[in-house]
Amino acid sequence: MIHFRHLLICLFLALIHSAATGQLTLQIYGLPGTTHENSSVFVAGNFNGWNPGDQAYRFQREAGGLFQLTLPISAPFDLEFKLTQGSWQSVEGDPAGAFLPNRRYSYSGGLDTLRMKIESWELLDPNPRSTAGPNVKVVSTDFRMPQLGRQRRIWICLPSNYESSSQRYPVLYMNDAQNLFDASASFSGEWKVDETVAQWSGRGFIVVGIENGGENRIDEYSPWPHPKYGGGQGDEYAAFLVQTLKPFIDKNYRTLKSRRNTGIMGSSMGGLIALYTAVEYQNTFGFAGVFSPSLWFSDQWTGHVQYKGKKRPVLFYLLAGVNESETMAKDVWLLAKALEDAGFPASSNRRRHRRRRRPFRMVLGPGISRGGRLVAESLMKKGLSFDSPFCFLGGRRVLNPRPQDPQSCALTN
C-alpha cells in the first residue's frame, strides 16, 4: 500500500513537472514525393535562432514514415518556424512549390502534439540571383565586433543621389540585414528596403544593415538571459553599434551625425534590441522602429524603460500584428503605456507646440509575417513623421485617442 501511494505521488509530481516545463511534440506524417529516402528534416524558428541545420532540432525517423521531434519549451509560447532539409536552399514550400509563409502555433502548456504535412520543397535556385539594387554595398564581410569577440557582415544602402551630390544624410541602423535588401540572402523574404530608399522623394537617407549572428542571434538581441533560450549579450551588441560601428560609418560616409538624424530599427528579437538600444543610448539615437518586439522573452524591459526614463526626446514607432499571437497586441499596448509613464508622452498640446512631433506612434495590423513592405510604407514613406498614434485593424486606418485602451479606436477615412 505504501509502495502504491509512493508511486501515485511520483506520477503526480511528474505530471506537475511536465505541465510546468512544457513539452511540445512536432510530428511530420507526410513528405513530398521528391524527398530523398536518406534526407533529414530540421525545424528552424524563433526558438533556435532560425538555424536551418541545427542538429539539436533534427527530426527523428520513426516507424511508418513518421518524423518526430520534442521541444522542451515553457508556456505560453508563440512559435514561428519553417521545416527544412538542413539549409535555406531546401525549405518547405506550398503545394505549387512556391514560397510558404512561416508556420505559427500558440503553445499553451502541458503535453501537446502538432501534426504537420510538408506539401513540397520550395523550388529554389541553388545559385540564387541577387536582388540587391545598385545602391546596396557590402561594407565588410568580417567587420570586427570587439565587444563580442566576433565578426559580422555589414551592408549599406545609399541614396540614389549619393554619388552625384555632396550633401550629408540621416542614418537608420537596421538589424537582421539578411532580410533587408537581397532575396538570395534572406530566410523569410526580402523587405525591399533598397527599393524604398531608391524611390524616396525627399532628401534621402542611408540604411546600415547588420547581419544577425545566426546561432548567436538570440544571445545578441537580448540584454537579459532567458533560462531556456539564452540571451544576455544585448548590452555588448548595443555597445558595438554605438562605440564601433557608428563611428566607422560617420568617418567613411557623408552622414548627419547628430542623434536627431540617427535611428535604429528591428523586428521580433531585433525589435527588442532596438527598443533597448534606443532607451539605453538616448544621446546617440533620436528615433527607433520597434516592430513585433519579442517582449515575452524577458519582463525586464519594463524596469529598464522605467529606470532610464526620458533623458532626451526619442521618437518611438511601434508596429505589431493583432493576429501574430494572443499576446502581441497586448504587449505592445503595455510598451506604449510604459514609454508614456517613463516620460515619452503619447500626445502633446498641438496649439502650443505646432511643430513638435509626438514621441511615439503605434500601429497595429493583421499578421505581419513578411513585414518589409509594411515597414517601408509605415516608416520610410511617411518620412518618419509621428503626428498621431493610430492603428490598423483589418486593413482600415483607425485613430486611437487613448493608446492605453486598445478598444478605443475610432474609424477614420
Image: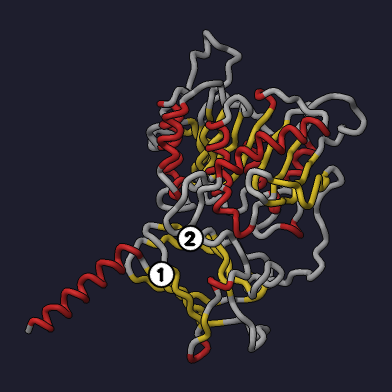
User: Quick check: 370 above or below 51?
Assistant: above
Find disc 2 in the rendering and name its residue.
79
Residue name at image x 79 percent, y 37 percent: 199
Residue 331 x/y as whole percent: 42, 43
Image colouring: secondary structure
Say whether residue 80 is left or right of residue 167: left
Label 2 near label 1: C-beta < 8 Å? yes
| Three-letter amino acid code of the residue under disc 2 | Leu
Q: Secondary structure at mark 2?
A: strand
Residue 73 x/y as whole percent: 41, 63
Residue name at image x 37 percent, y 59 percent: 75
Q: Secondary structure at mark 1?
A: strand
Say whether residue 372 is left or right of residue 278: right
Does the image show residue 403? no
Residue name at image x 85 percent, y 36 percent: 160
Looking at the image, which is closer to me, 389 or 342?
Answer: 342
Residue 193 x/y as whole percent: 73, 44
The C terminus lies in quadrant: top right
The N terminus lies in quadrant: bottom left
Query: Separation of disc 1 and disc 2 at Cα?
Result: 11 Å
Mark 1 vs mark 2: which is more N-terminal? 1
User: Quick check: 237 above or below 310?
Assistant: below
In this view, the residue farthest toward the bottom is: 64
